[in-house]
Image: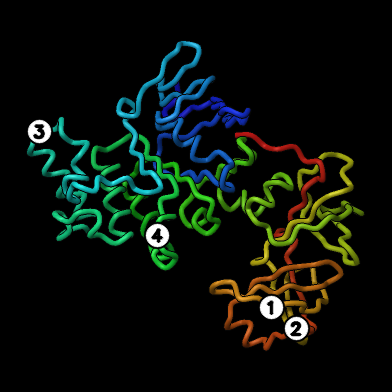
């Protein structure tokens, strides 16, 4: 029996909806797996089934040799017997207990000396000194999040489960805590599953990405791979690939694929397309498009497309540039780059895209499984 998580289960709801996980395996080594998808896709239900809060109707959930759930054996371990740490969306702190008593809630079986040592260590580690006797209502959102995390990890669980851990915070606090949360989780050395529907959060926190759609896992892999190389059109939409256009393969030669898209021709690296594939979707991430004005000079990208700026839109720290280059194309540039290029609507620019940054999906691509 391998260490780590093995899960295969289905949770059914009144009305016929089913949340299903097929053969999910997760190492016991430290790392962060992100459950990603739109609201209602089943992410929280999967987390609650792993935690032992919800009981599936079929399947098996194991951690190493320990069986947490087996429908055939009518076996179901409650959360307290799974040795997991769980942080719900609202943090679920006890409003009448101080910070110190909230964190110590699960340590009542430990000797007083060890309990005090663990409390002291976790409070210092998460920077909660001076807040020990405050109530949750007297804390900021970021402080509440740290208390909830401290309570979940102070008794040293084998698996940590976080449900939208930053969603209850305001936007500036979320941005600030993304990096801190990943640093904390990696220092803990506990394998972690994080639920989120926020793309930036998933990219900042995760090592592995599990994409869910309408109750099913549709792709699983390293975070950069899934975001850059979705297996089908549904996943491309979920991970928000900015440019997805129908194309047609017209040539395969020397490890390269030539594709027509609208009035343009693009060159991509040869990919694992099914034999005979001609109709594809062409996927290009906006951050992979380079914009230039004037002479090109010495540039390495194979794809150089004359384009017209159709629209400029501010999106947080970057500018979204909608282009027409024989097909609709989206680029992201920093505000500084936008000012240096003096970009305006109707400007003529050159859009440069490297061949490896163009991903092709067969138009009838099957969904991937874990």
Q: Nearer the viewer, mark 3 or mark 2?
A: 2
Q: Earlier in the sequence, mark 1 or mark 3?
A: 3
Q: Earlier in the sequence, mark 4 or mark 1?
A: 4
Q: Is residue 242 above or below residue 100?
A: below
**Mark pair 3, 2: CA separation:** 69 Å
Residue located beneath label 2 in the image = 345
Q: Earlier in the sequence, mark 3 or mark 2?
A: 3
Secondary structure category for the residue under label 2 = loop
Q: 24 or 136: nearer the eye?
A: 136
- Residue 280 at x, y = what percent? 83, 50
What is the quadrant of residue 8 in the picture? top right
Q: 26 or 181: nearer the eye?
A: 181
Residue 312: numbered disc: 1
Q: Are marks 2 and 1 in contact (CB under 8 Å)?
A: yes
Q: Classify residue 180 as left or right of residue 251.
A: left
Q: 166 or 4: nearer the eye?
A: 166
Residue located beneath label 4 in the image = 169
**Mark pair 3, 4: CA separation:** 35 Å
Furthest residue toward top: 73
- Residue 270 at x, y = what percent? 79, 51
């Amino acid at each position: 029996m391998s260490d780590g998580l093995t899960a295969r289960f289905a949770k059914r709801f009144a009305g016929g909806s089913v949340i299903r996980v097929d053969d999910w395996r997760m190492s016991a080594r430290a790392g962060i797996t992100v459950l990603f998808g739109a609201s209602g896709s089943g992410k929280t239900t999967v987390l609650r089934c792993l935690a032992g809060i919800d009981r599936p109707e079929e399947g098996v959930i194991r951690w190493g040799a320990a069986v947490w759930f087996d429908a055939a054996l009518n076996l179901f371990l409650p959360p307290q017997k799974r040795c997991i740490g769980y942080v719900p969306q609202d943090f679920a702190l006890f409003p009448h207990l101080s910070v110190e008593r909230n964190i110590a809630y699960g340590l009542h079986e430990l000797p007083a000396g060890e309990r005090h040592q663990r409390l002291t260590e976790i409070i210092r580690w998460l920077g909660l000194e001076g807040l020990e006797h405050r109530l949750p209502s007297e804390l900021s959102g970021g402080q509440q999040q740290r208390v909830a995390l401290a309570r979940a990890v102070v008794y040293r669980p084998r698996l940590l489960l976080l449900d939208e851990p930053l969603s209850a915070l305001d936007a500036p606090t979320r941005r600030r805590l993304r990096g801190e949360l990943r640093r904390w989780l990696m220092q803990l050395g506990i394998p972690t599953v994080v639920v989120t529907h926020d793309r930036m959060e998933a990219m900042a926190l995760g090592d592995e990405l599990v994409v869910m759609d309408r109750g099913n896992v549709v792709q699983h892999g390293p975070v950069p791979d899934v975001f850059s190389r979705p297996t089908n059109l549904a996943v491309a939409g979920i991970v928000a690939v900015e440019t997805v256009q129908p194309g047609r393969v017209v040539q395969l030669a020397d490890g390269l694929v030539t594709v027509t898209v609208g009035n343009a021709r693009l060159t991509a690296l040869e990919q694992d397309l099914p034999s005979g594939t001609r109709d594809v979707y062409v996927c290009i991430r906006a951050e992979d498009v380079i914009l230039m004005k004037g002479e090109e000079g010495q540039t390495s990208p194979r794809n150089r497309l004359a384009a017209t700026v159709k629209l400029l839109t501010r999106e947080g720290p970057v500018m979204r540039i909608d282009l027409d280059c024989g097909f609709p194309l989206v680029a992201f540039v920093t505000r500084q780059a936008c000012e240096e290029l003096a970009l305006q609507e109707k400007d003529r620019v050159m859009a440069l895209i490297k061949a490896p940054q163009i991903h092709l999906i067969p138009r009838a691509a099957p969904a991937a499984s874990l």
